[in-house]
Amino acid sequence: MTDNASSSGSHFIQAIIEADLKAHKNDGRVATRFPPEPNGYLHIGHAKSICLNFGMAETYHGTCNLRFDDTNPTKEDVEYVDAIMEDVHWLGFDWDTRLYYASDYFERLYEFAVELIRAGKAYVDDLSADEIRNHRGTLTEPGKDSPWRNRTIEENLDLFQRMRAGEFDDGTHVLRAKIDMAHPNLIMRDPTLYRIRKTRHHRTGDVWCIYPMYDFTHCLSDSLEGITHSLCTLEFENNRPLYDWVLDNVTAPCHPQQIEFARLNLNYTVLSKRKLIQLVAEGHVSGWDDPRMPTICGLRRRGFTPESIRNFCDRIGLAKRDSVVDMALLEYSIREDLNLRAPRVMGVLKPLKVVIENYPEDQTEELEAINNPEDPGAGVRQLPFSRELYIERDDFMENPPKKFFRLAPGREVRLRYAYFITCREAIKDPDSGEVVELRCTYDPATRGGDAPDGRKVKATLHWVSAPHAVDAEVRLYDRLFNKANPDEKAEGKTYKDFLNPKALEILTGCKLEPCLAGVGPGYFCQFERMGYFCVDAKDSKPGGLVFNRTVTLRDAWAKLQKKGA
């Protein structure tokens, strides 16, 4: 088996779990967990971890817990807790009754810390954070012992109890593990286990003023919950010795196995929570759920389906080394999903009026249209056709170049499901010179098909009947950045300098088929020739439809790259 797993085959984590099951390790159990910090919204990278942890539990008939690592009250909020639970459920996973918080274990964690102090393996340090950092040493030089490292057990117990009682200010004392200041792994050089934070906690209120560090909390929470396989991303590989050291030096109920996998890196975006927070706080996007954002709520609002994201996570597989996944693969996943399910409709985004002069003024007829050629069971619908229509402004040129085959003066084209029409005259605004209306004629013998005399046309256009059209706002979303790696260092520039100014184009006065008049938030469809769209779940209202473009019909970016654009 190679480092990079095939999307259709097993991966290295499955091989580890299957070997453990064969050896009847953990009494034949598989128990995983998804442990987010409630200090931001989940993004597509978290979706990979969600699918892995819940997926392994499902595959091996085990359990997966949802546990919030709420150990830093200065950055946490109930808003994030609620959003994370909504995202996990939306992706199609459930934790049943297994919802936990690290704060559930604060008393137990305190007792474990006391156990380390009594064993002479932890001490209270008076050094500041900067001093601790300066004492740590480098990769080539050992660290220096703190002058407080050899306090007596009794003194350490007294100070730790007084820390808990709120006697000291923030930053004046920390509890550190007593390991080895010359350890080759810098993380093992007496890491901090507890710090003072006189901040109200969103669940425990003012009960605690000392809070455990992630590395101390995580392994013990895993143990208390009976987790068997603690799956985490590759940046925690260096932390694994500390994970094992803590569990080996306290009376933990069990010793889970930490296994690391490569995190998801996606081009044309950023997945750093700090940078995503900056984009929101500085107003570069409208919020965490902005459809340009790589957050799960942003992707959901844009029109991505949970199936497409799960398929994407399965397709990219798991690796032991970091790599970058092309955004085109995520876009392909949603196209593939919606192609099979999305009803086809016609929407004119930049309307140009067409008057068919030889069509009766008081006549409307119903034409039959296919709802989805990929799904025979989707049936057909009726399209109203009348004397006045809208076509896409880009489908007409007064002086077309050689390879432009759409409508032009004197040229004949087919209207989808309708008739052949010929442009006879272009009406212009006298002030601006802009074409505002086309005068055309139609051939009644061409209804729904080809001309009886065998003549051919080179273009088929989508259209909407003007008297029956539904007005809408349409938002054309594109990639958030115009540089594949916006984090790449460039002199005098930051990732924000590569924000794509064309990532959002808002079109008003768009004209849609009348069948869309009553659709609600989350409805998705394909506007023929234009892409896949969904009704915006936040801004769309009855009588004020707002559609978001989920993805184009084809990978336009790949085409631009081939041209060197």
Image (cartoon, helix red, strand yellow):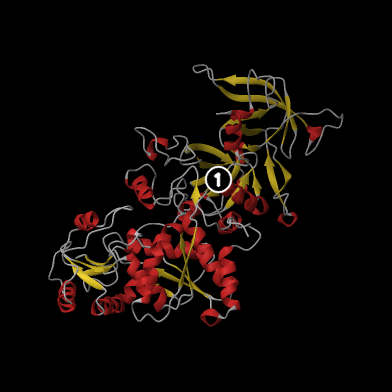
State which quarter of the image contains the N terminus.
Answer: bottom right
- How many marks can you see? 1
State which quarter of the image contains the C terminus.
Answer: top right
Q: Residue at x 55, y 65 (%)?
A: 13
Q: Position of residue 266 (x, y in %)?
A: 50, 48
Tell me which corner region of the image, top left, top right, bottom left or bottom right, holds residue 282: top left
| For residue 32, side relative to residue 38 (left or right) | right
| For residue 270, side relative to residue 166 (left or right) | right
Q: Position of residue 527 (x, y in %)?
A: 62, 43
Q: Tell which of 201 and 57 is nearer to you.
A: 57
The residue where tag 1 is placed is 326
- Can residue 542 be seen by looking at this rendering? no
| For residue 365, side relative to residue 2 (left or right) | right
Please tell me how crowded label 1 is: few (under 14), some (14-19), or many (20+) other residues with Cα within 10 Å: some
Q: Position of residue 537 (x, y in %)?
A: 48, 53
Q: Residue furthest left?
A: 167
| For residue 557, side relative to residue 155 (left or right) | right
Q: Residue at x 15, y 77 (%)?
A: 158
Secondary structure under badge 1?
loop
- Can residue 168 be seen by looking at this rendering? yes
Q: Position of residue 493 (x, y in %)?
A: 36, 34
Residue 553, above or below 83: above
Tell me which amino acid carries mark 1. Answer: Asp
Residue 38, above or below 279: below
Tell me which corner region of the image, top left, top right, bottom left or bottom right, holds residue 108: bottom left
